[in-house]
Amino acid sequence: MKRKTWLSILCFWAFSSPLYAKRSSELVYVEPFDLAAGGTTLTRASQEGIVFANPALLPLGAAKIRWLGFQAGFIVDRELLNSGGKLSNENSSTESEGEGEGEESAEGDPETDSTDQFFERSLHAGQTATLSVLNENFALTVFERLEIDAAGSRFGDGGLPGIELGVEAYAGVLGSLASRPFRWLSLGATAKYLMIGEPQIMIPIANQAKFEAIGKNPKSFLSELKYGKGTGIDVGGLLLWQNPSVDLSLGLKIEDLGDTQISNDQEALPQNVNVGLGLAFHGAVEVLHLSLDYRDVLGAYPTERTFKKIFAGARLMIRQRFGIGIGLYQGIPSVGLRLDLLIFKFGITAYGRELGAYPGQKQRNLITLYTSIGV
């Protein structure tokens, strides 16, 4: 029953919601270990994250092949995980108390409880996937990212109950070229083809008959899901001051150079400027990298508040096989671990995102589990 209800909700959204352009300066994709380091990417990024973050990072390091492989991640709300056992116990308790009582009472309580739960907690989940090849001067990656957020809300003068549903759906192909003409300077550019959909809609939950009718044809959801499409260019640079044990770097990236036009009447992605500082302490194989990013310094996204543009973090790599990341993503603590077993890599990141306009309005505390295969 619950599965059918969720399919109905998704289908109803697909038929009736408008498409919106990208609403913030956040990257369409951040590599999970970089999320652990507070989402900092301009002076250091991991694997395919370089292509999205700053293509000028490609020539750094001694490796000819930086990454060749596939990575998949799954995103879930920590609140949803923590409440899983509690909900099961509540449902079991309800069923036990209902034994010997009328059938109507046993069937009615769970449905009422599931409706009330939308007003007590949010539901957030998603997944990512990338297939990439990166060397010191060239990169190509195909990606997709989908996140769905649902929360109970009330609308209208009478405070009618509804489900506020937000979707972030991105996919595309990106290709990068980079060079390091001087030891202290690296330059790069990325051409990208993006498909973007960020619909938001309030769904009244009073009309259960409507949900059930749409639920009988869940395939219609896939046929109605449409993306806005567009092509754009990012350019980046990196200034480096290096000695045998300490590196200092300054990253600069112009994203969506000249604006990226999006089809389906979506607003263009505006040109925006991002800057970052990095400080690295390294030995023969261990590296500690500290970084600070400020995105959209010129205010191309005028409604986005400053706290959403600042990212800070640290990465510690031990023997190039074990990584620890900590940071602040939009002022929310983040932490993660990464294990490199040659061909296979595994990791977990805990972080938070603010989906509202001010701190604490719609904060989602998330966990990403990811794995990859490649070299």
Image: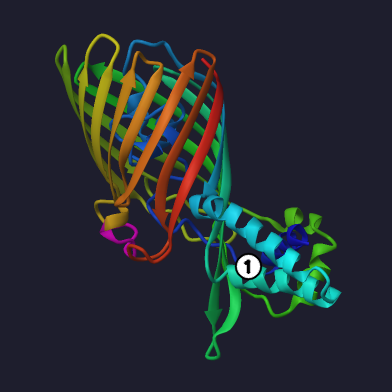
Q: Is residue 42 above or below residue 212?
A: above
Quarter location, residue 80: bottom right
Point out residue 6 in the picture as x, y percentages from the top left corner: 70, 61
Quarter location, residue 115: bottom right
Question: What is the three-letter code of the residue carrying label 1?
Answer: Ser
Quarter location, residue 263: bottom right
* Region rendered in magenta: 299-306
For this rendering, which residue is in front, 95 or 346? 95
Q: Is residue 329 above or below residue 133?
A: below
Left or right of 91 on screen, residue 369 = left
Left or right of 321 on screen, residue 149 = right
Q: Is residue 226 above or below residue 101?
A: above
Which residue is identified by label 1?
Answer: 17
Q: Is residue 245 above or below residue 2?
A: above
Is residue 276 something one can see in this rendering? yes
Q: What SS does tag 1 mark? A: loop
Taking the spot 31% from the left edge, 19% from the top edge, the residue there is 60
Label 1: how many Cα within 10 Å (few below 14, some 14–19, many 20+): some
Taking the spot 80% from the left edge, 68% from the top edge, the residue there is 99
For this rendering, which residue is in front, 10 or 304? 10
Taking the spot 23% from the left edge, 32% from the top edge, the residue there is 290
Which quadrant is the N terminus positioned in? Answer: bottom right
Point out residue 130 in the picture as x, y percentages from the top left corner: 56, 32
Q: Does the magenta run of residues contain 303?
A: yes
Majority secondary structure of magenta residues = loop
For this rendering, which residue is in front, 228 or 100? 100
Taking the spot 47% from the left edge, 24% from the top edge, the residue there is 139
Left or right of 110 on screen, residue 22 = left
